[in-house]
Structure formats: C-alpha cells, structure tokens
Amino acid sequence: MPQGQSHPNSRRDALEVTEEMEDGRAEPPTKKRRIFLQTMGQQLREVGVGSGDATSPYSRGLGRRESLTPSLNDCPSTGRPQVRQIPIQTPESDAVPGEDDQLSAGAMTSASKTLWQQGEVLANPATDGSDTFTFDDLIAWSRSYFDHWHPAYPFLHAPSVLESFNYAVKQGVRDLAESSPHKLTIIRSIMSISLADRRQTRIMARPVPSQLVFTSFNAAVQSIQCLLIEETSILSLQAVVSVQLLLISMLRYNAASRLEGLAARMAFHLGLHRCPMQFSAFPRKDAELRQRLFWSMYCIDRYICIRLGVPLAIRDSEIDTCFLTSERHGDAAHELEGMA
C-alpha cells in the first residue's frame, strides 16, 4: 500500500466512530471494549445451586467491584467533560468454579453459612414435631437423587439405602447416628442433594427435618473427619463419595478435590483398583458394587480435574478394574466358587 494511504476499513471505522461520538451515541472503541470485558463475566456466568452461597473474590471484601475503566478525571488536559465512575455489581455466581475456597478472606464464613432458605428445612425438630416422618416421606424427599444422580454415579446399593430409611423411621435418627454414623452421612448427603435440586425444579414439597440434611459445608466435611483414623471399609468410602458428590452439586470443587485424595487412598487400601472378578472371595453382588463404586470415583476424579486443571488422583496405568458391561477377566473364579 502506498505511503500515506490508509486502509479503507480503517477510514470507515474512524468515520463511524467520529459520527457516533458527535451524535453522543457511543464511546470510543477502546472504552467500548473495556465495558464489554467488564460485563462479559455477567453474561457468561455459570449459575450453580448455591448461587447465594458461592463467594466472589470481589464481593468478599468490598461487596461490589468498581469499574476498571480509567476515569476521564485522570486526563484533565483533554478538556472533555468529566464522567462519573459507575460501580458494576458483581453477582456471587460470577465466581469461577472452585474459586470460593482459593481465597482466605470470607472462605470460612461461606463454609459455615447455612445452606437452606426459609421453608425448605424445619429447623427445630424437637419442638415443631418435624422428627416425625414416614418411609414415604423419605422416598419423596430423595426422589430427585435417585432419578438424576444415582444413574450417573451408582456407587450406592439402593436396597441398602432403603433399609437405612426404614431403620431411621422405626428406630429414629439419633439411634441411627449411634449405631451407624456412616449410613446417616449417606442419608444426609442424599437428602441435601435432592433438596437443593428442588430449587431448580420448583416442586412444592413438605420441608425436610434439619436432622436429615447438612446445614452447612462445614457440617458435611466434619461428618467424615473421623475416617482419617478409622479402618477403611466400603461403607465409609461410600460416605466420603456421597459428601463429595454433594460438594460437586454445590460447585465446591476445591473441597471436593481435597476429598478426592482421601477417597482415592481409601479405594487403593480396599484394592478397588484391582478387578474383583479375579478373586473368588467376593460374591458376585459384592464384586459388582465394588466396580460401580470404583468407576463412580473414577468419573468424579476426571470431572474435578478437568474443572480445576489439577493432576489426576487415579491414573489409568495403575488400575485394571473392568467395566460392568465389558468384563475381561471372566467369571472363572466365581464358577469355581459355585462348583465348590
């Protein structure tokens, strides 16, 4: 292009900007781009279940974020009229998934904040009679979990969960907490996930007793702290994964990632990374449950690592557990067991 000759697109853009500025209809392109970048986070937000609980790095300390656009007050020599800075409100749902636990300011407050709104949970079971519920109530309250979450992550044995429901109805939640706290942790995770899903479906239902749900993220994590010193079992690992799934449903990916490290080590201690069909000691139903539990953990691990960009906790080179639908080791061990 000859020297001194401008590109036609450049001339056209400059003409359009000049006309718009003269009419007072637009701002210069650089300022328009800054405004676009500021509002893009609001347009591309990912709305989670706990949108009122997730914390934004901007809203933690200030409650709002000031505009990053340089004020015209900084350029008094231009002679242009001064423009007042307009604060841009930043919703809490603008926080990047997992960002809620990265900053120390406000993290503890958010984790201890109650998860439920008024009308979702009966807060005083001892005085308002909410400790009285039926088996059908438990089925209705947990329907969302078994309809949507259990098919994707079948790490639980549904008939065993129903037995726990029946025990809680007949013997009471307090007795269940003393006899089998891990089962109560699983029930609370199921009920909490289903109750949170109710906000999305807008289904009207009876409020859930507070003793059947986790009141905060801290309460959920504290329910499995004892597993750090206890002997590992399938039931205790299921309790960890149930709490982990609750955190994922609430977009608490960093907390779920920390539990993934615990869950992976517990799985290795139980030998879940080895196909149970190779050993005759496991009945077929137990072997299938071990496979379902392991592959549920495997999928959760992949999902969390993709969202956070962190290394895998379970590597393919260290496992040989078969899929339920593509068994490679055969049923030779179980056939020998049946012949005996």
Image (cartoon, rainbow, N blue to C red):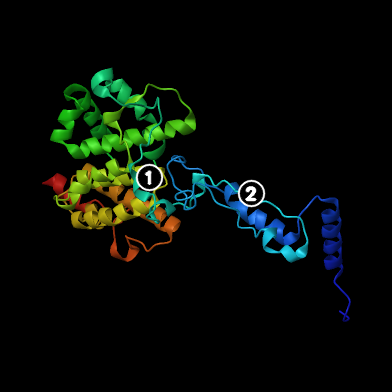
- Which residue bears the numbered disc 2? 86
Q: Measuring from the top left, give residue 172's x and y in whole percent.
A: 19, 25
> Hey, which residue is sitting farthest left in the picture?
340
Q: Sequence order check: which comes first, mark 2 or mark 1?
A: 2
Residue 74 appears in view? yes
- Residue for point 43% across, 54% down: 99
Where in the figure is residue 76, as x and y percent of width and height?
Answer: 72, 63
| Residue underneath mark 1 | 110
Front label number (2 vs 1): 2
Q: Which amino acid does label 2 sit on?
A: Ile
Q: Which one is in front, 148 or 125?
A: 125
Residue 75, image x, y percentages: 70, 64
**Kind of residue indicated by mark 1:** Ser
Horizontal side, residue 50 vs residue 262: left or right: right
Residue 222 numbered tag: none
Q: What element carries label 1?
A: helix
The residue carrying pointer 1 sits among few (fewer than 14), some (14 to 19) or many (20 or more) residues within 10 Å by Cα, namely many
| Measured Cα–Cα span from mark 2 to mark 1 | 28 Å
Q: Dot 2 lies on which element?
A: loop
- Camera-side residue: 336 or 150? 150
